[in-house]
Image: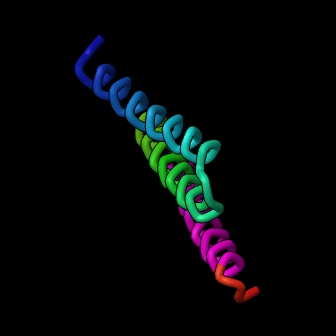
Amino acid sequence: MVFEDYFNLVIIAIISLGILLGFVRFLKGPTASDRVVALDTISVLAIAAMVFMSHVFGRFIYVDVALVYAVLGFIGVLAFARYLEGGI
């Protein structure tokens, strides 16, 4: 294996660990706000994984998918935050 392969494995391991820790926080979160933050963290890490996979596979359509997912995730977090504040 070359250096790039090891680097790719390290990056995937870091992103996977972050998603796992976010999922644990989502399950154990004592309040709804903690769960929303955990889901937002998981979504950001999923976006990072999509962009990284776009680089690895050389398929730049994944970047477009990641951008759409980022916008929809942001709107979802805003809507849920407004719901928690009693605005909806």
Residue 41, above or below 53: below
Horizontal side of residue 21 vs 31, given as left or right = left
Give the quadrant of the N terminus.
top left
Asked if residue 64 is positioned above or below residue 48 in the image, the reply reads: below
Which colour assignment does the render follow?
rainbow
Which residue occupies the extreme top position in the image?
1
| The quadrant where residue 33 appears | bottom right
x and y percent of residue 12 in the render? 42, 31
Rendering quarter of residue 73 = bottom right
Residue drawn where x is 60% and y is 61% of the image: 36
Residue at the extreme bottom: 87
Residue drawn at (59%, 54%), measured in percent from left and top? 39
**Viewer-proximal residue among 20 and 54:** 20
For the residue pair 17 and 82, the one nearer the viewer reads as 82
Q: Nearer the viewer, residue 32 or 63?
A: 32
Main secondary structure type of the part rendered in magenta? helix
Q: Compared with residue 3, is residue 52 higher up or lower down, i.e. above or below?
A: below
How many numbered marks, from 0 up? Answer: 0
Residue drawn 38% across and 34% down?
Answer: 14
Q: Position of residue 7 (x, y in %)?
A: 29, 27
Magenta span contains residue 40: no
- Asked whether residue 60 is drawn in magenta, I would say yes
Where does residue 46 sit, x and y in percent of width and height? 54, 47
Q: Is residue 58 above or below residue 87?
A: above
Q: Quadrant of the C terminus?
A: bottom right
Q: Is residue 61 left or right of residue 80?
A: left
Q: Is residue 1 left or right of residue 62?
A: left
Q: x, y percentage for residue 71? A: 58, 69
Residue numbers of the magenta segment? 59-84
